[in-house]
Amino acid sequence: MHYTHFLQLYIPPYASSTIDKRSEQASAISLLLLVTVRQRLVTYMATSMGCIVLLCLVSPLLLAGAVRGDPWGGLFPQFYDHSCPKAKEIVKSIVAQAVAKETRMAASLVRLHFHDCFVKGCDASVLLDNSSSIVSEKGSNPNMNSLRGFEVVDQIKATLEAACPGTVSCADILALAARDSTVLVGGPYWDVPLGRRDSLGASIQGSNNDIPAPNNTLPTIITKFKRHGLNVVDVVALSGGHTIGMSRCTSFRQRLYNQTGNGMADSTLDVSYAAQLRQGCPRSGGDNNLFPLDFVTPAKFDNFYFKNLLVGKGLLSSDEVLLTKSAETAALVKAYAADVNLFFQHFAQSMVNMGNISPLTGSQGEIRKNCRRLNNNH
């Protein structure tokens, strides 16, 4: 069967069941599901020339390897089943301890994986400290005084090294920790393809330029995603990660006082919500004052982030523009606000997609013994 004929006929089971379940709701949302599924299939087929189409479409796991030119791309969930059978259990246990101690750590570990993958791919470059040969990404504008969770990763790595020396990569630790963190605070589970290796360098320039920023325009954000093979569905679904976690005053102050250079607040921001934010985020000072990205359920992974956007209560400009600057992204926001299961399905799929950005496999890179430094830098 020709690919285009297959596209017209095949709808994955999760899409059809979702449409059946929502058959009594607005037809626009049902149409949206068909459109977004079709967009996903087109994108995947365009980047999966070397794999069997049916397998690529049915399994998020197989999709993770498609862009590498074979169905697996060197990544698969069972990668450590023989070489380090307790690897997943060790990661999960330590992440659970960290999140129990501080719920915010769940969001921090998800963000750490995101900031890693968007710079040089998912290769743990974000974990490297400064050295004679490395300018750390930790000093970039998006990461400085902001990125957290390094000590949790250190603890996981030390435990894994004791159990299985030189086996489990720091990049895979980040991918597993992000999944486990999401589940621990009520979000979806997904199988994490594994087998990444760790980078031999970092890119502070890439960190400054490639990570979407709170004040980026929507076209800029979409462009940054597309550079990594991610589409508009991924943009909106992954933005939903802001259903947990905190943001600093400096990341949204502009919205409160001078959004367009006219000395006025962002007109898309709810007036009462803006007044509340100003109490803790003054015109000057208080840069590091923290505010929940989802003020309704800040510690629970759910779809209130999207519901907040619908009433002008998204915290960051990069959040609210999903509703106000594009009919395509706005339709997704409304669909996710109406159906938490659809959001969870798309978020899980998009996390697999993001986790497959340019992984190092085979003999590329190395397996660091300490995630903060290269093996030849003692």
Image: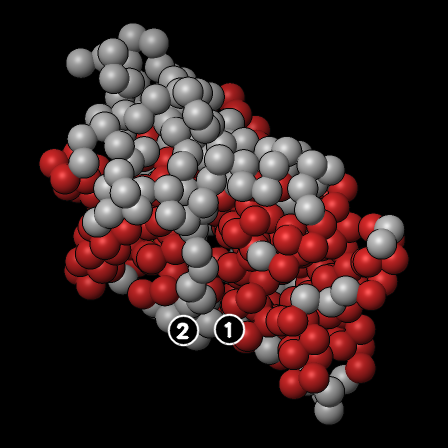
Q: Is residue 27 above or below residue 198?
A: below
Res 80 quadrant in image: top left
Who comes first in sequence, dot 1 or dot 2? 2
- The amino acid sitting under disc 2 is Thr
Res 216 quadrant in image: top right
Q: Position of residue 272 (x, y in %)?
A: 53, 73
Q: Is residue 258 above or below residue 204?
A: below
Q: In the image, which disc is placed on residue 304?
A: 1
Residue receiving disc 2: 297
Q: Is residue 259 above or below residue 320?
A: above
- Viewer-proximal residue, 287 or 307? 307
Q: Is residue 375 above or below residue 178?
A: above
Asked whether disc 1 touches disc 2, contact meaning CB atoms under 8 Å apart, the reply is yes
Residue at x-position 58% and y-position 57%: 59
Q: Inspect this view and state whether residue 144 appears.
A: no
Residue at x-position 60% and y-position 33%: 68
**Label 2 environment density (alpha carbons within 10 Å; few <14, some 14–19, many ≥20):** some
- The amino acid sitting under disc 1 is Phe
**Label 1 environment density (alpha carbons within 10 Å; few <14, some 14–19, many ≥20):** many
